[in-house]
Amino acid sequence: METILLVILKLSGLLYLIKVLDYIINWSALLKQKRVLINDNSITISIIIAARNEENTITNLLNDLIKQTYPSDKYEIIIIDDFSDDDTYNVVNNFIIDNGSHAFQLIKQKKEDNNTFGKKKAINLGISLAKGTLIVQTDADCRVGEEWLSTIVNNYSNSDAKMMFGLVAYNNDTTIFKKLQHLEFLSLIVSGAAAAFTKPIMCNGANLIYEKKAYEEAKSLSKSDKYASGDDVFLMLSFKKLFGNKSIKVITDKEAIVYTEAKETLKEFINQRIRWASKAKGYKDFDIILTALIVLLFNLSLVLTFILSFIYNALFFPFILFFILKLLIDFPLLYKITKYINRKDLLIYYIPLQILYIPYLCFTAIAGFIFKYKWKDRVVRD
């Protein structure tokens, strides 16, 4: 038993090291990419926002969107109310009335259509009504800077991408719990961005951009309808399958970062992470599966080594050795992303996060296959 576990720990640790080193190299290469400033204001954009119970947050986003430096006659804002139980629809409608000089569409899904998961149906409905060449997708509780659309267009004009995604970070992380969330979330964001430099494996629907024409071609390949989560990643995988790895690009510009909020409670956080993990059942992509197995196997073997060290004392030293190795492996990548977004202050929580992260990852990865979760007041089990 001891020998088998040590072999697994060593092998998974080596593969994990190789994977993270690859991400570090890719992230550095991403930041070195040069772009020519192209003031192309001819591209039309449709911003898609699926909103459910966001009466307290969506006005902030809408205010950000009407302040964009990109010409207002070149973009429209489409909001789809996803069966909100609060006053979201009226809040948005009143905002539109007060800001009539901008192109808005506000759609309320029909009750008889509520036979599939709301957000995905809402996004599809929004895209079907979109007039823009480029679809830009974000969430109703997010914030964006004034240069967001202009930066997106410049990146698009500098590439032959069919799909792009930008960085996402947390706003107002005022508590230790939120700071821990932020640091963990940044590890996902930088890993996804770095992986996409060669082999895309993840993206975030809060900052997702794609050609409408390409979407029409790729949507039939998406397997997302079976799952409540994953509309972003499944769509990305469809683009990857149809157009290839190079059709998907990352926008690293700080002006294109989208900011969202960390969860207030541990229950909300766990529910969110189980929701994210639940879509793994639908993945058929080799790069995603391999990466997920390496990460899970290394962390799970660490947990088992620690537990069994109370029975087999000889396992305690290997556990300490490989835990320290993990600290050393992960730190450079987190240092790079926190430095890039001017949040190196978060690194004070690095070791506490690592201690919590290993068992948490193992739990949520398994729970995503087993448990129900609550999302936007809906109880879901894929």
Image (tube, rainbow, N blue to C red):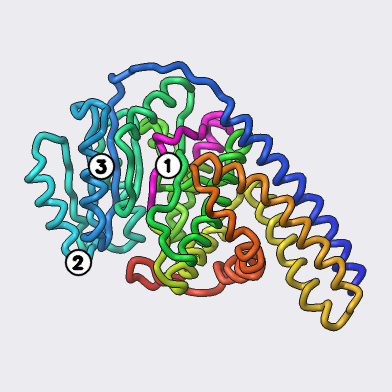
Which of the two discs, 2 and 1, sits closer to the camera? Answer: 2
Which of disc 1 and disc 3 is earlier in sequence?
3
Helix, strand or loop at label 1? It is helix
Q: Please, what is the three-letter code of the amino acid marked with disc 3?
A: Asp
- Please identify the quarter of the rendering in which residue 141 is found: bottom left
Residue tagged 3: 64
- Please identify the quarter of the rendering in which residue 305 is found: bottom right
Residue occupying the point 33% across, 32% down: 147
- Please identify the quarter of the rendering in which residue 378 is found: bottom left
Residue occupying the point 39% across, 30% down: 152
* Mark number, residue 219: 1
- In the foreground, 148 or 295: 148
Q: Magenta includes 98?
A: no
Q: Position of residue 216 (x, y in %)?
A: 38, 36
What residue span does the magenta drawing correspond to?
Answer: 238-260
User: Label 1: how many residues lie within 10 Å, few (<14), some (14-19) or many (20+)?
Assistant: some
Residue tagged 2: 86
Helix, strand or loop at label 2? It is loop
Q: Is residue 382 visible?
A: no
Q: Is residue 289 left or right of residue 207?
A: right
Helix, strand or loop at label 3? It is helix
Residue occupying the point 72% across, 67% down: 300
Q: Please, what is the three-letter code of the amino acid marked with disc 1?
A: Lys
C-alpha distance separating marks 2 and 1: 31 Å
